[in-house]
Amino acid sequence: MTQDPYEILGVSRDASADDVKKAYRKLARQLHPDVNPDPETQERFKDVSRAYEVLSDPQKRAAYDRGGDAFSQGFGGAGQGFSFTDIMDAFFGGGGAAAGGASRGPRSRARRGQDALIRLDVTLADAAFGVTRDLKVDTALTCETCHGEGTAPGTSPITCETCHGQGEVAVVQRSFLGEIRTLRPCAACRGYGSIIPDPCRECSGDGRVRSRRTLTVKIPAGVDHGTRVQLAGQGEVGPGGGPAGDLYVEIHVEPHKTFTRHGNDLHTTVSLPMTAAALGTKLTLPLLEADLSPSEETPADEKPVTTYDLDVRPGTQSGSEQVIRGFGVPSLRGGRGDLVVSIKVDTPTRLDPRQEELMRELAAIRGEESPDGRNEAPTKGMFGRLRDAFQG
């Protein structure tokens, strides 16, 4: 069989490095022992691997092109070996430094910090109209002694003697393919390429310390229970003085004694005596704004309205609702929801003799002394009413 690496790989002598790699990948997929285990194919796979070892190395290729002996350049030398990365590349592709067998270099000590989450309890009024709070937060901060470097004052990291600053070491293993070389993180420096001989005593070389600080957080109007407010860069500082993560403030809205929230609408219930519901009346209804803390700095003409005069029409039935537009919760996107007022009519349970006499007299006047208590048809929904309209 020919010993010309160009002929073995099936490429021309002016083939580029990419062409050589593509040809090798194609043949490696066809001839790898896992695909074709017969001895003849294994020998050919070895020849292809050795040919690629020569043509993928610029120095070996140049020496061969000048008429050098391919075997002396590693073409037939089992002791020279080839990169295991190239074989993996043939099956799984890849690119960049790792695909070419080059070192990835040491990793940085500085890494981004983790995000932090804290809970903030607020009232319904604060959630609806916004509030500014001072929060005490326990997070990791940059060490002021070493400024995130992790070294004691006046010292600096030294180059790792094991990996010589590369952060990786080569591990060579023998196999039927020859010597397989892989790169692993250096155990001495943990892949950093340098060692801190004298760590900072304040942070033990981590570059950060835990501390309590106070943050002023502005909660926007319209937030709801479970809403998370993001404070960029206010989370945990990363190791080695790396950038801080984000801080998330999760809103927990406390239950209100009279109002409940449904989306951006507020719901409340008012109780009326039977006589007021029958005759009609006017109620002074407290609004959610009444829960806001008064501010002496706010001009009188800009202070929020805290009550609403609600007109109850004569003959109002228990369970009926009145909608007050624009008195609900402000939306995060603008606008404001409604206030829905449910009417509950109270029926008296105890009457003195005079009240009972008047009630009986009223019942006689209205012919309600012996009501028949007839059943009423259930209320039809919108689709039922439309169906009746089309059916005539």
Image: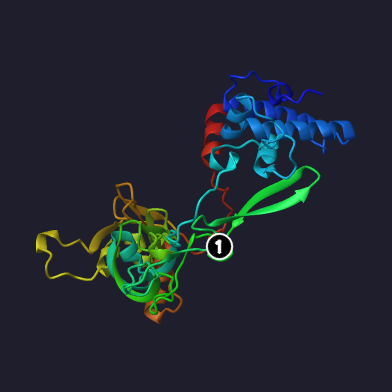
Image position of 211 (left or right of 380)? left
Name, please, the residue furthest toward the right: 38
The answer to whether 78 is drawn above or below residue 320 in the figure is above
Color encoding of the figure: rainbow
- Residue under the point 28% across and 64% down: 131
| Residue 92, picture quadrant | top right
What residue is pinned by disc 1?
162
137 or 166: nearer the viewer: 166
Q: Position of residue 336 (x, y in %)?
A: 31, 50
Q: Where does the C terminus fall, quadrant-wise?
A: top right
Image position of 150 (left or right of 385)? left
The answer to whether 371 is drawn above or below residue 358 in the figure is above
249 or 262: nearer the viewer: 249
Q: Position of residue 27 (x, y in %)?
A: 74, 28
Name, please, the residue furthest toward the bottom: 352
| Residue 327, picture quadrant | bottom left
Residue 255 visible in the picture: no
Mark 1: few/some/many CA within 10 Å (<14, 14-19, 20+): some
Q: Where does the N terminus fall, quadrant-wise?
A: top right
- Residue under the point 53% across and 64% down: 189
214 or 94: nearer the viewer: 94
The answer to whether 148 is drawn above or below residue 383 in the figure is below
Q: Position of residue 117 (x, y in %)?
A: 44, 65
Q: Amino acid at mark 1?
A: Thr
